[in-house]
Amino acid sequence: MCPAPVVPTADRGFIIPIGGGEDRVKEMQIHRRFVELAGGENADIVVIPTASQLEETGPDYYRIFSDLGAGNVEFLPISRRVDCENPEFSEMLDRATGIFMTGGNQLRLSTILGGTLVAQKIRRQNAIGVPVAGTSAGASIMSEHMVAGGDSNSAPAVGNVSLAPGMGLTNAVIIDQHFTQRNRLGRLLTGTSYNPFLIGLGIDEDTAAFIGPDNVFEVVGSGTVTTVDASHLTHSSMWDAREGEAISLLGLRIDVMGEGCRYDLTNRQAYAPDDHASFCSLAAAEIKVD
Amino acid sequence: MCPAPVVPTADRGFIIPIGGGEDRVKEMQIHRRFVELAGGENADIVVIPTASQLEETGPDYYRIFSDLGAGNVEFLPISRRVDCENPEFSEMLDRATGIFMTGGNQLRLSTILGGTLVAQKIRRQNAIGVPVAGTSAGASIMSEHMVAGGDSNSAPAVGNVSLAPGMGLTNAVIIDQHFTQRNRLGRLLTGTSYNPFLIGLGIDEDTAAFIGPDNVFEVVGSGTVTTVDASHLTHSSMWDAREGEAISLLGLRIDVMGEGCRYDLTNRQAYAPDDHASFCSLAAAEIKVD
C-alpha cells in the first residue's frame, strides 16, 4: 500500500476480493499484483477451486500464476468435507505464501469448508501475513457475513438478499461481486441496512479491492468498487416493511471508486488516487466493529 | 453454573437467550435467576424495550424485576437510531450490572441499535462481566448471525430461513426461539448447514440457556433447548438444491435438553443434569471458531 505493501506494525496479510470475470489473458494486473504480494519467484501459491465444479479451474489458475512468474503453484482438489481433513492439504497451506479461492458457488464453498481444518488454516495463515485472494464466489465468502444470493435490482427490498455465514477473514464488510454487471446495489443496500455496522463492498468484474493490514483498501482493475456506509442512517423502514413495499433508508453514504482510489475501513473514509497526503498519514488500525 | 456462576479466570458476563413467553407471574425462575446474577438487591438492571412497540413493555419489566428484589431498574426509551447517541443512556449502561432486551421484532432491534454507541456499550459491558439477557427477539439478536425470519417446518429447505447480522455477543451459536411451539427446526437446520461451525440453539418458550463465561450453558425453564451441531456433516446438498427440492444433510448431531442439562459450546458436548463430574472438570475456555 503506502509506501510498503505491508507495514511492519501490522501482521495480517492482504485480503483481496475480486469481482469475477477478471482479465486472464492480457495484462492480468490483478493476478500479477497478487503474485507479487505472495513473493513473486519465491511465491508458493495454493489455489482452492472448490467453489467450481469444472475440472479445468485448478489447472487454469496453475497456468495463470505460473505465467506470471510464481515460484510454485499447487491446487487443492477439495470437493467434499472429508477432503478438508487431509493432512497433506494442511501442510500445503502451512507452506503457502499466497492463497487463491476461485469462482463458482459461494454456498458450495461455505458448506464444504465451513468448520473444517482447511478453513481454520486459511484464517490463521492470513492472520500471520499470508495474502488471501478470491474471485466471484471466492470473494463473497471472505467476510464474516456472506451474500449467498438475491435479486437483481437497484432498490432495497424485503427478501431481496440471502445472507449466510462466510469465512470471517474480516467482519468489517459485506462483499458483493459482478456488481454493476448484475445490478446488485439493491441487495447490498438491504444487507447493510440489516445492521449498519457493516460496510458494503460492491465489486465490479475485472476489479479488486486490495485490503491492507491497516484496513485501507486500494481499487485495482477496469471497473469500480462501490462502498455503502449505512452507519449514519437516521431512518430505516427495513425492519417492518412488507413484501413488495418501498423501503426508506435515509442517510446512506456511498462511494463509487475507480482504479487507484483508496478507502479506510476504520474511518469509513474514501481517498482519491492523488490524495496521498491524507492517506499516507494513516496509522495501521484494527478493524472497527461498531 | 458450577459451582460459582462466574469463575475468576473468565471475565465475560453470562449470555442468557430466552425462548419467549416465559412465566412472568408464578415462580418466574428465569427472571429470578437473572436478577441474582445481576446482584440481587444491589442489582442495577437496564431494560431495552426497543424490539417492542408496546408502551407497557418497559414498565412491565420494571415491575417484574422490582418484585424479584432488584435494587434498581431502569429502561431505555430507544425507538430511533438517534436515541442511541443519548449520553444519559450511555451512562445508564455504564452503571448497569444487568441488561435485558425484550421481545418484539429482532430486525427492528438490529436496524435501530446496529452500529451505535448503545450496541457497543452492551457488548463491552458483557465482555467485562455484566450478564445480558434477552427474550424472543431479544434472544435472536444476541449472536453474530441472527435468524431474522423464516418458515415453520421441520425439514431444511432452500430459502426457509432469513439471516441478518446480530449483536455478536457470541459467534459460536445461531439462536432460534419459540422453537417447538412454532415448529422451527427446519430453518435452524438450514441456518447451521450454511456454515457448520455454528451451533444451532432452538429455545422453547418459558425456557432459557444460561451461557456462562466458560461457554458452558445450563437449561432453565419448562421447555427444552435443542442444539444442532452440523460440524460433523459428511454430505450437504444445501449449496446446489433447487427451490422445493429435498435437502440431504448427513451426519447432523442434535441434543434436546430439558431443565438442568448443560452443553459445552467449546467441545460441542451435552451433559445430563446429574452428570456433574465431567461437567465440573471443564476449564474456562474461549469461544471456539472452527
Image: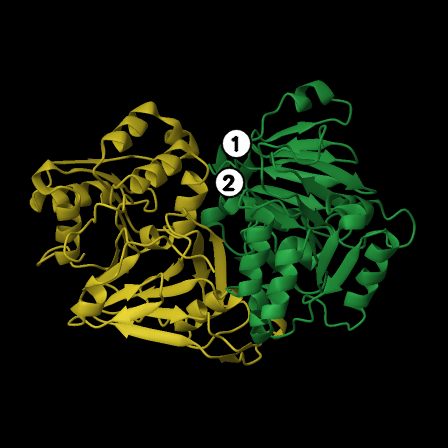
Chain colours: A yellow, B green
How many angstroms separate mark 2 from mark 1 (CA)? 8 Å
Q: Chain of mark 1?
A: B
Q: Give x and y (percent) for residue A235.
A: 55, 78
Q: Chain of mark 2?
A: B
Identify the residue position indicated by label 2 in the image.
Answer: B196
Q: Earlier in the sequence, mark 2 or mark 1?
A: 2
Judging depth in this view, the residue of A182 and B97 nearest the camera is B97
Is residue B205 at all visible to an observer of this figure? no
Q: Is residue A238 above or below residue A288?
A: below
B281 sits to left or right of A218 = right
The image's mark for residue B263 is none
Q: Give x and y (percent) for residue B118.
A: 58, 63
Identify the residue position indicated by label 1 in the image.
Answer: B232
Q: What residue is shown at x 48% (from left), y 64% (from top)? A: A161
**Residue type for callout 1:** His
Q: Residue B67 is drawn in which quadrant? A: bottom right
Q: What residue is shown at x 70% (from left), y 41% (from top)? A: B210
B230 sits to left or right of B134 = left
Is residue A70 at all visible to an observer of this figure? yes
Residues at badges 2 and 1 in contact (C-beta under 8 Å)?
Answer: yes
Q: Give x and y (percent) for residue B136.
A: 71, 56
- Element type at mark 2: loop
